[in-house]
Amino acid sequence: MSQPKTLKQKIENRVARTRKTDVFLPRDFADLSGEDQVLRALRLLVKDGSLMRLGYGVYARAMKSRISGRPSPAPTASIALHFRLLPGLV
């Protein structure tokens, strides 16, 4: 298996491999590159429909809606749980 070449691909691979949560923060990818580059890659993933922006600095794994075909947050309770665990977001 070849190594991902772009930061976007690296983040996409990490999101795909992560099973314990559907919510991601930019700091989850801080080891891959600088903050500006990570935010730029996250914006591209939101534009592609792989991730969905829930709020400032909070992203969720996206799934295509069966009804509209548009991205929607993954249907798990972990999203609500993470909002409760992260201070200052609710």
Image (spheres, helix red, strand yellow):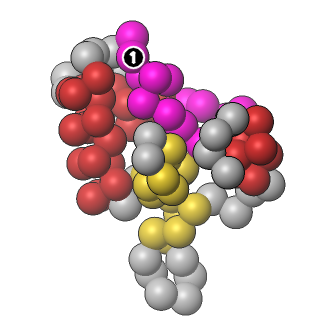
6 and 82: which is toward the camera:
82
Q: Quadrant of the N terminus?
A: top left
76 and 16: which is toward the camera:
76
Q: Residue at x 46, y 69 (%)?
A: 71
Residue 42 point in image, percent of width and height: 32, 41
Q: Compared to 37, does 3 lie above or below? A: above
Residue 68 point in image, percent of width and height: 47, 87
Residue 74 point in image, percent of width and height: 62, 59
Name the residue type under label 1: Ala
Q: Is residue 57 visible?
A: yes
Q: Residue at x 44, y 47 (%)?
A: 56
Q: Is residue 59 magenta?
A: no
Residue 6 point in image, percent of width and height: 20, 27
Q: Compared to 76, does 1 lie above or below? A: above
**Which residues lie in the magenta part?**
16-31
Q: Could you tell me which secondary element the residue under label 1 belongs to?
A: loop
Q: Residue at x 33, y 26 (%)?
A: 10
Q: Residue at x 50, y 44 (%)?
A: 58
Q: Quadrant of residue 20?
A: top right
Q: Is residue 29 magenta?
A: yes
Q: Is residue 63 left or right of residue 84?
A: left
Q: Quadrant of residue 73?
A: bottom right
Residue at label 1?
A: 30
